[in-house]
Image (cartoon, rainbow, N blue to C red):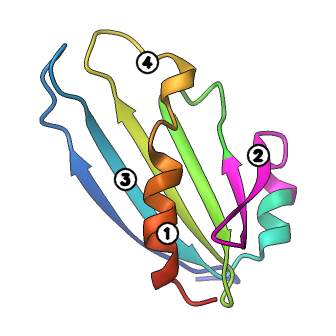
């Protein structure tokens, strides 16, 4: 397989109703890529931050609309939480909504990840 290995899972909530309910697709990946390698790769779209005291990157790429990701440093490499926002209207959601509620979700899940 090579030097890097990623394991992941995806969750879908795509039963949105326009103007009523929105849906999300959430992917969680863990990989043996170092935090610094992730920063070097995606530093142009990343903002360094922390989640519950853990080093993290908020990754928002304006060309990948409706998407938001957090990469967290772990003892095995990184864990990436990537969400696609399915807007409740035709067309893309405003960029200010792409990460709405995402940080709070990652804060809740972070304690379950190995340091």
Between discs 1 and 2, the one toward the N terminus = 1
Label 2 Cα crowd, 10 Å radius (few <14 / some 14-19 / many 20+): many
Question: Measured from the top left, where is residue 3 in percent x and y?
Answer: 70, 83
Disc 4: which residue: 93
Circle 2 is placed at which residue position?
Answer: 46
Camera-near label (1 vs 2) is: 2
How far apart, in angstroms, are the residues tagged by discs 4 and 2?
20 Å
Q: CA distance from mark 1 to mark 4?
A: 24 Å
Where is residue 115? Give x, y as percent: 64, 89
Magenta region: 40-58
**Pointer 2 and pointer 3: residues touching (CB < 8 Å)?**
no
| Secondary structure beneath label 3 | strand
Q: Earlier in the sequence, mark 3 or mark 4?
A: 3
Judging depth in this view, the residue of 64 and 47 nearest the camera is 47
Q: Residues within 10 Å of mark 1 (few under 14, many from 20)?
A: some
For disc 3, the marked residue is: 26
Quadrant for residue 89, please give it.
top left
């Amino acid at each position: 397989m090579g030097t890097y290995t990623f394991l992941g899972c995806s969750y879908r909530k795509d039963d949105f109703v326009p103007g009523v309910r929105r849906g999300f697709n959430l992917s969680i990946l863990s990989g043996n890529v170092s935090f610094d390698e992730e920063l070097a790769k995606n530093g142009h779209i990343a903002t360094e931050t922390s989640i519950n005291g853990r080093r993290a990157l908020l990754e928002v790429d304006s060309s990948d609309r409706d998407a938001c990701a957090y990469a967290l440093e772990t003892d095995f490499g990184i864990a990436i939480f990537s969400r696609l926002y399915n807007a409740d209207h035709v067309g893309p959601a405003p960029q200010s909504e792409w990460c709405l509620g995402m940080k709070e979700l990652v804060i809740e899940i972070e304690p379950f990840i190995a340091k």
